[in-house]
Image (cartoon, rainbow, N blue to C red):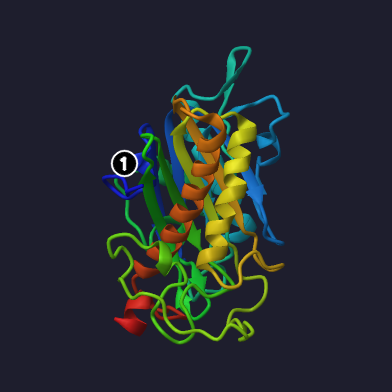
Amino acid sequence: MRPGPKNLITDVAGLRVGNAQDDVIKTGATVLVGDAPFTAGVHIMGGAPGTRETALLAPDKLVQQVDALVLSGGSAFGLDAASGVADALRTQGRGFQVGDQRVPIVPGAILFDLLNGGDKGWAENPYKALGRVALDAASEDFDLGSFGAGTGATVDGLKGGLGSASLVLDNGITIGALVAVNALGAVTIGDGPSFWAAPWEMGGEFGDRGMGKHDPCAEPRPEARLGENTTIAIIATDANLTQAQATRLANAAHDGMARAIHPSHTPFDGDLVFAAATGVKSLPDPGFDALRLGHAAATCLARAIARGVYAATSAEQDTLPTWAEKFS
């Protein structure tokens, strides 16, 4: 396996990502959109999720494909970002056809960033507009760190951020991860700069600091208040997967979250992974290749989490330092 040419989720052909943020509010939204509808699944392991249209992603439901996926800050307010995306897609003539109407299918997930130092005194919910702007910005190239849904994200002791990574398997199938890292737990080891995801780092993509020393008996004592968290992610591939297989891929990707964040999947996080499959390439060996895809998804997500925190940048009124401010 090797990283794709951009080391971004958009190494999966036919997918684009757009970011929009408001630096005064310290929040934002990120959209993954396909050139065509794609198969999607979801798996939720956190105890406090916030979601839109995830029930229809179950393999036994009528709709098997979606038009876009949205990650947003703003807690429950941020679910409106997906409404802005759906409105814009409808004007483009996209969506699930019912008679002479088209209904864009846009599942979304949110993280809590309402206590991060920004001005949250808005007169009107800003997230619908942020979703539309993010869709308009969708491209194969996009920024990591303090952009989009990662703008106001935090982790234990540091600013969080938006991360991405990709892998090309030996069989030619590509897989990528996109994540907004806003965890109760820590992504670095102890008091040092090393990332828990260090064993999976490729090409010094998050500082090449190796594995630091840690006390295996140390109990977590997060600085954040309980309920301020959630890491939300998307795993994408160009493989031809059923909705059941996409759901299983999302399930496997959670291993990457557990590798990169300590602790993860807590009762106070809403940890969630969407999976997206464009269906361009068949699996040469459906049994064994499904296993390989799951492993690659976990590896990509662990790397993307570290990259998101590593790339975070400072801003006025931040409540926490960036990784670069603290360690570089």
Q: Nearer the viewer, residue 75 or 84?
A: 75
Label 1 Cα neighbours within 10 Å, binned few <14 / some 14-19 / many ≥20? some
Q: Looking at numbered disc 1 in the image, what kind of residue is underneath it? A: Glu
Q: Quadrant of residue 201?
A: bottom left
Q: Nearer the viewer, residue 67 or 259?
A: 259
Query: Which residue: 41% across, 84% down?
Result: 192
Q: Is residue 28 visible?
A: no
Quadrant where the image shows the C terminus: bottom left
Task: Spot the residue most to the top.
Answer: 99
Residue 281 at x, y = what percent? 43, 26
Q: Quadrant of residue 224?
A: bottom right
Circle 1 sits in a helix, a strand or a loop, which is it?
loop
Residue 222 at x, y = what percent? 60, 81
Horizontal relation, residue 65 to residue 134: left or right: right
Query: Which residue: 36% across, 69% down?
Result: 310
Q: Nearer the viewer, residue 8 or 321?
A: 8
Q: Which residue is mark 1?
A: 140
Query: Which residue: 47% across, 22% down?
Result: 93
Residue 283 at x, y = what percent? 48, 29
Residue 113 at x, y = what percent? 55, 67
Horizontal relation, residue 34 to residue 142: left or right: right
Q: Is residue 114 visible?
A: yes
Q: How many marks?
A: 1
